[in-house]
Amino acid sequence: DAGVIQSPRHEVTEMGQEVTLRCKPISGHNSLFWYRQTMMRGLELLIYFNNNVPIDDSGMPEDRFSAKMPNASFSTLKIQPSEPRDSAVYFCASSFSPGGGYEQYFGPGTRLTVT
Amino acid sequence: GIQVEQSPPDLILQEGANSTLRCNFSDSVNNLQWFHQNPWGQLINLFYIPSGTKQNGRLSATTVATERYSLLYISSSQTTDSGVYFCAVGTSGTYKYIFGTGTRLKVLA
């Protein structure tokens, strides 16, 4: 398996622009997670989906952030409008969660810089 | 919410040395993973270990769930072991993981 795939790997954008990050989970996995990593706050869970349904978005910082999972093999995280404080590494992870224990697998991350 | 503490925060070793990293958590957990974040930023799965002991080459891990801690052992360390080691835990009824603040390891040649 190719693992979790994220694109782009690096994104540089100007404040106010829309940013869309993409994720393809591991085939057969039914849970998908978006995390953000910064020096100040470490690794934070933003939102997670189970069977394509958003289960908990309490970590989404504000209304400028939105996430979708239109099907089992694709998810997007959108920031509109972007701000310099959104600069971070955004990770997507997936797992197979049959209701019991599970193991998360992380993608390579997208390094976002907002100037 | 559950608190996850890792110690030590920083560790410098000479190549070939052994080390023990600790993860304490404040509540019962159903899921626990150890990750290695390498200098290129990749998060690599080391162990999924909500309880018991596992070994993989020079690495091993033990979780004592009743006492709310997990240990990661690195033996005969190599420079490629450098990076940050994270413990992440999840509790019953949720798929969420809470990450510790990590142990930053530097192995000197």
Image (cartoon, coloured by chain):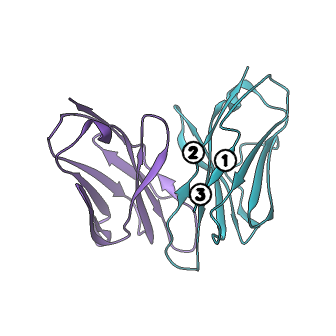
Decide which of A93, A5 is in the foreground and name it. A5
Cα separation, mark 3 vs mark 1, equals 11 Å
Residue on which the image places disc 1: A6
* Amino acid tagged 1: Gln
Element under disc 1 = strand
Say if residue B69 shows up in the picture: yes
* Amino acid tagged 2: Pro
- Whole-percent x, y for residue B59 in the image: 26, 56
Measuring 76% from the left and 58% from the top, which residue is drawn there? A74
Residue on which the image places disc 3: A2
For chain A, the rendered hue is cyan
Per the rendering, the mark at residue B86 is: none
Please tell me if label 2 and label 3 are on a single chain: yes
Say few, some or many: other residues with alpha carbon within 10 Å of mark 2 (under 14 / 14 to 19 / 20 or more).
many
* Amino acid tagged 3: Ala
Say few, some or many: other residues with alpha carbon within 10 Å of mark 3 (under 14 / 14 to 19 / 20 or more).
few
Image quadrant where one finds the N terminus of chain A: bottom right
- Whole-percent x, y for residue A105 in the image: 53, 58
Which chain is disc 3 placed on?
A
- Seen as rendered, the residue at the extreme top is A115
Residue on which the image places disc 2: A108
* Label whose residue precedes the other's in the sequence (2 or 1): 1
The answer to which image quadrant residue B34 occupies is bottom left
